Image: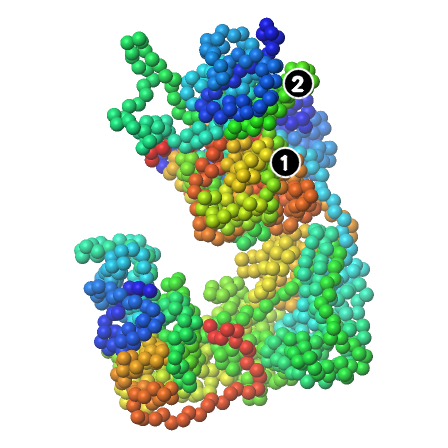
Amino acid sequence: MENGFEPVMIGFTCNWCSYRAADLAGTSRVKYPPNVRLIRLMCSGRLDPTFVLKALSAGADGVMITGCHPGECHYLEQNYKAMRRVMLLKRTIAQMGIEPERVKLVWASAAEGIHLAHEITNFVDEIKALGPLDWPTAPRRRALEEIEQLEVEEVPA
Amino acid sequence: MKTLFYPGCSMQRSARPYLDSLYAIQEDLDLELEEVEDWNCCGATEYMSISRLPAFSLIGRNLALAQQQVNGDASLLAACSACYLNLAKTDHYMLEDTVLGQDINTALEAGGLHYDPGSIEVRHLLDVIMNDIGMDRIAELVTHPLSGLRVAAYYGCMIVRPDLDQRWDDPEYPSGLESLMSTLGAEAIDFPLKTHCCGGHMTQISPPTAFELIRRLVHGAAQYEADVLVTVCPMCQLNLDAYQVEMNKHFRTDYEIPILFVTQLMGLAFGKDPEELGLGREFIDSGPALEKIGVETSDESGEPRKKRKKEEGLPMPPMVGGVR
Amino acid sequence: MSTENGRKENGRERIGVYVCHCGTNIAGVVDVKEVARWSKEQLGHRGVVIARDDKFMCSSLGQELIEHDIKKEGLTRVVVAACSPHLHEKTFRTACSRAGLNPYLCELTSIREQVSWVTSDKKVATEKSKAMISGAVERVRYHEPLDPLKVPINESTLIVGGGIAGIQSALEIANAGHPVYIVEREPSIGGHMAQFDKTFPTLDCAACILTPRMSEVGTHPNIHMLTWSEVEQVDGYVGNFTVTIRQKARYINTDDCTGCGICVEKCPKKVIDSEFEVGIGYRKAVYTPFAQAVPKYPVIDDENCIYFEKGTCKACEKFCPTNAIDFEQEDELITLEVGNIVLATGFDLFDARRIPQYGYGRLANVFTSLEFERMANAAGPTEGAIVMRDGHTVPESVGIVHCVGSRDRNYNNYCSSICCMQSLKFAHLVSERTGAQVYNFYIDIRTPGKDFDEFYQRVLEEETLFVRGKVAEVTDATRLPGEEGKLIVQVEDTLAGKQRRIPVDMVILSAGLEPRRDADDVARQFGISCSSAGWFTEKHPKLDPVATMTEGVFIAGCVSGPKDIPASVAQGSAAAARVVSYIEQGELSLEPVRASIEEAMCSGCRICNDLCPYNAIDFDEQLMVSEINSALCQGCGTCVAACPAGAISGTGFSDAQVLAQIEGLLMLNLEEPAVMAEPV
Amino acid sequence: MTENGKPKFAMYWAASCGGCEIAVLNIHEAILDVDANFEIVFWPVAMDAKYKDVEAMEDGEIFLTLFNGGIRNAENEHLAHLMRQKSQLLIAFGSCATEGCIPGLANLSTSEQIFETVYQGPSTENDDSVRPQYMTQMPEGIIEIPIFCPTLRTLQDVVDVDYYIPGCPPESHQIAAVIGLVISVLNGEAELPPKGSTIGVGDSTVCDECPRERDVKRIKQFTRIQELEQIDPDLCLLEQGILCMGPATASGCDSRCPIAGAPCIGCYGPPVGVLDQGARMMTALASVIDSRDPEEIETILDGIVDPAGSFYKFSMAHSLLKAARPSENGR
């Protein structure tokens, strides 16, 4: 990873599981890097590849999609649709010269705050390793000031 | 179908009848066994616990040869449980532990060989019979059903355990061999000791221990009034057959349970000549038992057997699809 | 992107941004004053006219601040940067509506859970907060004023499952004066509890406490029982369900039947009773499952009845004093209109055959817990005598194996919670009635309930032996003297640290509880979700344990996981309370987060038709377009995301809102407006 | 206005195949109305005219310009600016101008790769691998050819566009209708639609006009049409596992291809209001794939041999990503 590069990433969360996992990570004071900015959807099934392409073409270095574990979707089975969309999308963006690893699908139940924090931390590292995307269509992005590496640690609430 | 075959040392010597009977029926099963050229020892049961890397490399060589011979992906058939387990284990751990995989291949390079883990699928004969050939086909082949023959199906420890995530039968309580036996027309008893230890190499290290283990099995078979105990493993056969007399001396008992190979009974059911199947070469004469199904190997006659009393009283729960 | 819709006051929004300190929870890490200043300054051209920070936005003072600004400054949109929407979204929405602003024009962004609590660096936290507010501002511009959907609630309730949980629910609702339908698969209500002998820890007889409740259900004016029936189809939504029920042919005319039992007496056909007597007892081809069955009417089992097999016999018909037998009877489909549904379909016992090495089904004297319950029950096949499979021999030693199929990664990981107490109960009954030596083979003993541990102590004192370790196998293969004719339990005694072989006459497998084998279908039928284990998922495991994600469908008892009788009863009552409160409200308002189809744009490609688990999407064959029933829609947005024509839009989470939020989060709004793409 | 009082009409082709011109001529009698109502001042494919003639015109002197073709080189770009400057109404005409069309697919490759294919490809005899030079010194002087841009852009990416008429090519009856509209506007009988609207399309997608029977969709495998034994003449092609872009393609073509038994390949571009045609098709397809097992899904997806090429066959240059990013691995 090149030094100083702080990626900006968009994360899509499911209102019922991963968004609550993010809440839980908060209430249990788990520290994780600030690079991912979350958007709340009602369900990962709402995830429209357009959103991902929009984010990437508008300056995001990576996109994280999170939802309920297979079989545990709040809306019964919609997370499978999200999974299939992401699988197809990855194939397409690969042809467009974007590393498929820049789009990541993560399952996190409402109880898995720490797990989500870990996943975010890992994803940020992976994107740092890949370097900036800086998609030509993206307007100049104002980078976050340089920040020191943050380790995931748990602090008693 | 043409299948790559790893015979292993036992089948060429002590367990020759196993090999002979397998060859005798391979056409019926339309198997075309092609021996791995220049194969070497599988390390048997001890080597791996004595020196891991050399043991793995030793086995790895066989896999490498196999891969070379079929130049690509294929399955490798082993009839000896020990050979099967060692080959399967090695392939499995080479996949799982890439470092080990590399080390083994470094060792193999010395002989100009290389093995890509996962490229060879190691199969046990019983697995192939159960899942590829299938009971329907077997049933078609049966010309001389083994009606009335009570068989204790004995698996030993090595073919279903450890369960290297390639389960082809229940690792705790397998039942494939039983269904094969009933397909051959025999009466497969529910043999609770089917996966218990046969003594392994204890016969060499501490005979009394081995004798006790052998006694349990033979006693069990007798308790269930089995005519024969059928096995798929040369070592099991050797221990239970060759040491049965010794064991009897040791405990002053007089068990006489013939120990046969699965392929021998298949051969009989397919109407093959007992000679060709290597029958009569066992220590405990299978003659009396086999007479029940009209197979002439000797002139002794087994006395008529009393039927087991059926349970009365509370009905037993119906077994859906038999014991599994 | 600032001018594409006409909703805006003179062409642009007036947005108020409110940054909460949450005491030091946020202010300790985020420079809230800077964030507020920045929002006003940098997002002014995006419509932010006010940006304030306050110690506690959720306090009445904080809320009044918002209300004041809406009134005085004519705000058209509100953004609150504070805690998670799951905590205070409602609070701030209500504040807005008090000030006359549509509550859905308010957006809450969580800079506490997502920033201050998870970030240590002050500077970074402040930057991230800015980004999130910028996202919220862009998003809120596209919010639309919404009104909650109101639906009327039908007064009747359907209860599926006539076990103790269902019975409890039914009685509670009926006693509140509302009509109840209770559907039971078996010929009688009562469920598993009716099969039990004694109940732990008090050891009072199950029948004695259950039958009064059963007959109360049978006679209650507000309760309509549909036994020997199953739910066939469920349509509609909370307050307005239409349920189709198949009432299986009883071949007995219940209007004429007096339940005298002569038909049962005269029936020549004896069959193994694999339902109520779990296979260790017999019944006739015409039968009532047990003496105190409710309703009292018998059922003719057409699979075993001689008449149905051979076309002759009709003994029952000949002897029936009231000519109630009707061999011509057929299944009947009944349609019910109900407002709420309570699912209390209970559990299945783990099938011990799946662990062959434990010998059930192979070894005669291995019994399951339910078999033992029947055996111990005075009304059971042995009239309460605890005997071996031969029907008379009394065991001298009995082994009870705990956790059969539970806490075992090969079968079920979870603890079935009742087995410990059940096994202790068995231990007590065995030693009490036979004086046999009892061994308990356990992993851990779990007795957390009221008076549970006292009962454990009592059983300990009864000289029952406890061996701590998982049983490896139960076998009849003898090895040592004294084992002949016995069952040998091979177990590792983890306290003594050695292998043991314990010969016993009888083994009881304390089999675990499993979801009903058709749980998945039922879940699909009622539009609720199952955990990976197959238990129904609660709306909230702690705070809403009897509701499901589907409004109007409630769960009680073992459907959501193993429970003992008190817990199931409590849940029955809880579910009833929820139902009654809905009924009392008369109508219910639903979140207006819904999808809708723009008919002109719909091509009728039918991509969306199969995507909705709630069947909210219908295809109109005439118009050749798809339509959404907004009351059925749960607002997941899957169809919105799937529609290739972009004809489906979702309120609350529209493309415009999400795309705008993306741009906001990426801070594109700080660039020249020229680069801002036009969201569709 | 000209001396004969007729408003001036122009049509220009940039990076395109010329099919759009044919389509215009293909409107039969209606072409006479064009002549009757307009004076054609510039139309390279139909009449002789010089750039300088156009350059000589007053700004906005041309009333209506149909501009087809994408912007691939400096000349295209120059003409785009020129026509914009001289025209009152500049219409992006046809798929190339509105969304890049097939030439836009070249955005998956670098200029270098394109040149290789063109000048050294198997179909080209060019032993001493000659490449065109932007400037060549000849006895008569320096000859220049227009500079080749790194990507193909749509007209709206270069100049301000008044209206869009998609289609490859636009359907004749749609063209006729649009011309009819413009004429009635000229006679004050009608109003122009709001600037920036897409005209000559339906408000739904191709399926709307497709007569094939359709049911709920559960796709187990994708096959290319040539791999099928036979095709059900009446059943929705998608339901037969053929990748038909119909669901995500603007209507207006009377569903020509599906009626003829060929899948829609998306030439009419995204339906009105859709940001990215490919994304919409991806999300729709993925939604109806009938499997929950990742491995099986991958196998099913293998049936879509060239996702980007299939989903963005026409709209690549107008998609959110617009072009593939050149990467060291050759592209």
Whether residue C133 is visible, yes or no, is no
The residue sitting at 34% across, 17% down in the picture is D134
- State the quadrant of the N terminus of chain D: top right
Mark 2 = which residue?
D184
Q: Position of residue A45 (x, y in %)?
A: 56, 45
Image mark 2: chain: D
Secondary structure state at the residue bearing disc 1: loop
Instruction: State whether residue C365 is above or below residue C74.
Output: below
**Residue C266's quadrant in the figure?**
bottom right
The Cα atoms of the two marked residues, 1 and 2, are separated by: 27 Å
Q: Position of residue B157 (x, y in %)?
A: 35, 73
Q: Position of residue C398 (x, y in %)?
A: 52, 81
* Residue nearest the observer in this picture, C603 or D173: D173
The residue sitting at 29% across, 11% down in the picture is D138
* Residue nearest the observer in this picture, B219 or D97: D97
**Residue B297's quadrant in the figure?**
bottom left
Secondary structure state at the residue bearing disc 2: helix
Instruction: State whether residue D81 is above or below residue C399.
Output: above
Q: Amino acid at mark 1?
A: Met
Mark 1 = which residue?
C601
* Residue nearest the observer in this picture, C652 or D218: D218
Seen from this angle, which residue lies furthest front?
D29
Q: Position of residue B191 (x, y in %)?
A: 42, 80
Instruction: State whether residue C269 is above or below residue C103.
Output: below
**Residues at marks 1 and 2, common chain?**
no
Image mark 1: chain: C
The residue sitting at 31% across, 93% down in the picture is B300
Which label lies toward us, 1 or 2? Answer: 2
Q: Amino acid at mark 2?
A: Ser
**Residue D26's quadrant in the figure?**
top right
Q: Residues within 10 Å of mark 1 (few under 14, many from 20)?
A: many
Q: Residues within 10 Å of mark 2 (few under 14, many from 20)?
A: some
